[in-house]
Amino acid sequence: MPALRRAVPGFMISALTLLLLCQLAGEIVARLLSLPLPGPVIGLVLLAAGLAIRGKVPDNVRAVATGILRNLALMFVPASVGIITQTHVLAANGPALALALVVSTIITMAVTALVFRWATLRANLGHTARSGAGNSNGEED
């Protein structure tokens, strides 16, 4: 069935249009509100919110997103070329960049651990409340 859907005119165009419109909306929001977030990040949040409200990802969006993700490595080529062509900037700012990289990695790991711990505690509390609700004699399971 997916092969039939790909043959339908506009299958890919409508999905790409949705993705680009979300990115454009994110850019507009970021600039109008002078937010310190990139427009594409805000657009991604808008897309995720829209898909969450809808309750499922449309087949055409799923197919296009999968195709983009399969070729994601190609998106790093321009950044890699920029690094190679700007080695003098990298050399001049190397220690500061290395420090920023190490500090941001440590902060990311700490925040991830705290969020995981919070989510685990929350899940355990919910499980305890559900399992204790059905026990009428007050004893633990």
Image: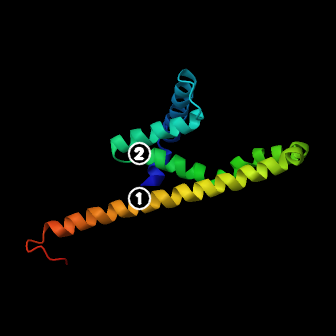
| Residue that lies at the very extreme toward the right in this rendered image | 88
Q: Residue at x 40, y 59 (%)?
A: 119
Callout 2: SS: loop
**Hey, what amino acid is under mark 1?**
Trp
Q: Is residue 46 visible?
A: yes
User: Could you tell whether 54 is left or right of 25 in the image?
Assistant: left
**Residue at the image point whose x is 53% and y is 55% from the top:** 111
Callout 2 amino acid: Pro
Return the x and y of residue 87 as percentages of the image width and height. 89, 47
- Residue of label 1: 118
Instruction: Please give the count of numbered marks on the rendered protein.
Output: 2
Residue 77 percent across, percent down from the top left? 76, 48
How far apart, in angstroms, are the residues tagged by discs 1 and 2? 32 Å
- Indicate whether 14 appears above or below 92: above
Q: Residues within 10 Å of mark 2 (few under 14, many from 20)?
A: few
Which quarter of the image is occupied by the C terminus? bottom left
Name the residue nearer the viewer: 116 or 56.
116
Q: Identify the mark at residue 135; answer none if there is no mark.
A: none
Task: Mark yes or no: residue 13 visible.
Answer: no
- In the image shown, does 122 or 67 lie closer to the viewer? 122
Asked whether the beta carbons under mark 1 and mark 2 sit within 8 Å of each other, the answer is: no
Using the rendered view, name the quadrant where residue 50 is placed: top left
Residue drawn at x 53%, y 48% as measured from the top left = 65
The quarter in which the N terminus is drawn is bottom left
Q: Give the residue number, with chain letter if any, for mark 2.
A: 58
